[in-house]
Amino acid sequence: MDDKPRSILVLGGARSGKSRHAQSLAEGMGRDRLFIATAQAFDDEMRDRIARHRADRDASWRTVEAPVDLPGAIRDHGRAERILLVDCLTLWLSNLLLSDADLDAAGRSLVRAIAETPALVVLVGNEVGFGIVPDNALARRFRDAAGRLHQDLAARCDAVDLVVAGIALRMKPPAR
């Protein structure tokens, strides 16, 4: 019986090393690699971040941009021989929030897409629940939506890793 996880959720704070850890996991799975990017380059600083992330991946990676329709990208590109690396859920959720989308419905759609894809999936997200309660309604709405999304994905994913200071801790073991 194969005891390797089909889906892994990687959480951590900003600059924690979660993207590097997720990329390493994906590269160790020995499949056709597809990076699903959710970032949008609205300013020079974000363009630089995107460029750095691209430079970290070698030519074995293809990239698809899905700033809003992440479930659709997973459905469209999920293949049995493929690993999908989604980076990051936090930016995706921000994009949805700014477009006034139904965040709960989008989260349910994402969970369904992950459950239905034949591909292996590694998801990256910022853990935002360790800080203080935000002082404004928009930030509280975002924090609450991220918490719900991460809980739903953690329940669905076979494995969950928490990354702090570049060190990964497996929080949920692979399903057997």
Image (tube, grey):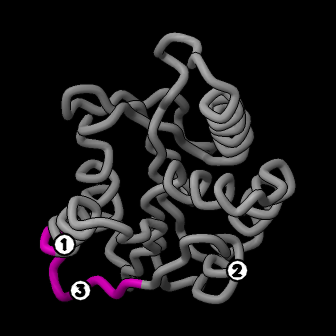
How many other residues sit within 10 Å of disc 2, few (<14), some (14-19) or many (≥20)?
some
How many other residues sit within 10 Å of disc 1, few (<14), some (14-19) or many (≥20)?
few
Viewer-proximal residue among 12 and 97: 97
The image position of residue 164, as x and y in percent, is 28, 26
Quarter of the image where one finds residue 153: top right
Count up the numbered dots. 3
Residue 153 among those drawn in magenta: no
Highlighted magenta segment, given as a residue range: 55-63
Give the farthest residue toward the top: 132
Is 156 situated left or right of 66 in this image?
right
The answer to whether residue 155 of the structure is visible from this angle is no
- Type of the residue with mark 2: Gly
Is 110 situated left or right of 4 in this image?
right
Which label was assigned to residue 60?
Answer: 3
User: Distance of mark 1 from mark 3, alpha carbons?
Assistant: 17 Å
**Circle 2 residue:** 72
Which label was assigned to residue 51?
Answer: 1
- For marks 2 and 1, the one nearer the N-term is 1
The answer to whether residue 55 of the structure is visible from this angle is yes
**Height in image: 152 above or below 96?**
above
